[in-house]
Image (cartoon, grey):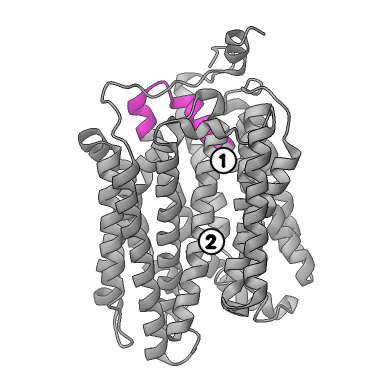
Amino acid sequence: MSARSAPPASRRWWALALIALAQFMVIMDTSIIGVALPRIQDDLGFSQENLSWVFNAYVVAFGGLLLLGGRLSDLFGARRLFSAGWVVLLAGSAVAGAAGNVQVELTGRALQGVGAALIAPAALTLLMMLFGSEPRELTQALSLYGAAAPAGGTAGVFLGGVITEYVSWPWVFYVNIPIAVLALAAAPALMPGGSGRARGSVDVVGALTSTAGLGAIVFAVVRAPEVGWDAGETWLVLAAGLALLGAFLGVQASRRAPLMPLSIFRAPNLGAANLAQLLLGGAWIPMWFFLNLYLQQVLGYSAFPSGAALVPMTVLIMLGMIVLAPRAIGRFGPKAVTVAGLLVLAAGMGWLSLVRSDGSYWVDVLPASLLAALGMSLAFIPSLGTAISAARPEEGGLASGIVNTSYQVGSALGLAAMTAIAASAGADQVGNLPALTDGFSAAFVGAGLIALVGAGLVAATLRTPRPDRPVPAPVSGAEHEKSAGR
């Protein structure tokens, strides 16, 4: 990055705090509405079947548009897209909080997802621009950034309970507004500027086919537990989604300036690291979701104690990502730490599958959840860092969009699949504690298998980089133009 556009060194860590706040917020917005859903349902008239779309409208827009967000970040500049994303997120939060009916509420949630899809890849690109030239600092920065994700997920549950119980449900959306204003005010002073770092135009056809394809697949899987996995609608939408993704790949192979140049996957370890992130999301999010349900529906915790019960797990994840993971990576390398983390996560899931209908938090939840949290903290940082650093600097935004897409799509698909497994094992029998427990146990087993499969695939596909190979240093837009002869 040029000296003209780079913030002073003493302010880079403040910039990292803002980037971590962005990650915290986009993940928190997936979970903060959970406790508020019954009151949203009563006030806005959601049916029981459609209520889940308060969550899914955000996830589908977020996961489906991340690739476009990454490409726009490369074309127009990460700081511009970062700020634009906060504007959209602010608008969506205002709409969702003020909604008086189902349609407006879902529109607001989708707008929040669009804003998050612009913020997330731009934030990772800015992180690489600030810290990519110093491998040790980059690991520390990624650790802090990574710790913000589980902290945001758990804080969403905790804050959602507090806000819903003591204020009112619209404030689970309004809480975003002052934070967005703060981010918009701070970004120009803290973030590196400069124009976009890539040539080309926006691939509209690619954006439409990829977003529609990913959205259709996520829609089909999250809706399948309601309409049935054997329903014609499920398979028709899945087939349409796969056809759209096939069309997307065809467009990318033929266009001169594609949304996602397929050559990016020639980078060593990019595909393997994204696979790790996809399966990590597919295992972790169902665990978190069903653990919260077990606490409330089986152990009888109310909203506030249920959120508080997840705090020890969050603290361990943050400590693991900030303190343990960087040291482990330095000693054993990213591949070994990623595999070990997924294995530990699988072991924690297996332990959680032993939950009892007459169990207790101290015996059935706390020790197993801490083991799972340790695994998450070990696996997340090295797979994320490998995925980002594997790409060329001018494709940093695209790589950020791909890895965020992998994690979010894995989360949505994993949660939908585990919801179907849990329901078939008895989790749809609200009030029947043994049946509920059996269903949740089955979901924990399924999530553990996802983590176990992930460990095996990462061990087989991720290459061990040479110890003397430096992390690629990002370049500014001006430097890229100079090297390109412009």
Mark 2, secondary structure of its residue: helix
The answer to whether 417 appears left or right of 81 in the picture is left
Residue 151 location (% of width, % of height): 43, 53
The residue stretch that appears in magenta:
122-139
Sooner in the amino-acid sequence: mark 1 or mark 2: 1
Residue at the spot 37% in from the left edge and 57% down from the top edge:
314
Task: Name which quarter of the figure residue 201 lies in.
Answer: top right
Q: Quadrant of the C terminus?
A: top right
Main SS of residues in magenta? helix
Q: Residues within 10 Å of mark 2 (few under 14, many from 20)?
A: many
Residue 295 location (% of width, % of height): 40, 77
Residue 64 location (% of width, % of height): 63, 51
Q: Residues within 10 Å of mark 1 (few under 14, many from 20)?
A: many
Residue named by callout 2: 412
Residue named by callout 1: 401
Compute the Cα span from label 1 to label 2: 16 Å
Vertical position of residue 426 compared to residue 152: above or below: below
Residue at the spot 70% in from the left edge and 48% down from the top edge:
209
Residue at the spot 29% in from the left edge and 42% down from the top edge:
325
Vertical position of residue 270 compared to residue 31: above or below: above
Vertical position of residue 14 compared to residue 48: above or below: above
Tell me, yes or no, if residue 319 can be seen here.
no
Residue closer to the observer: 138 or 232: 232
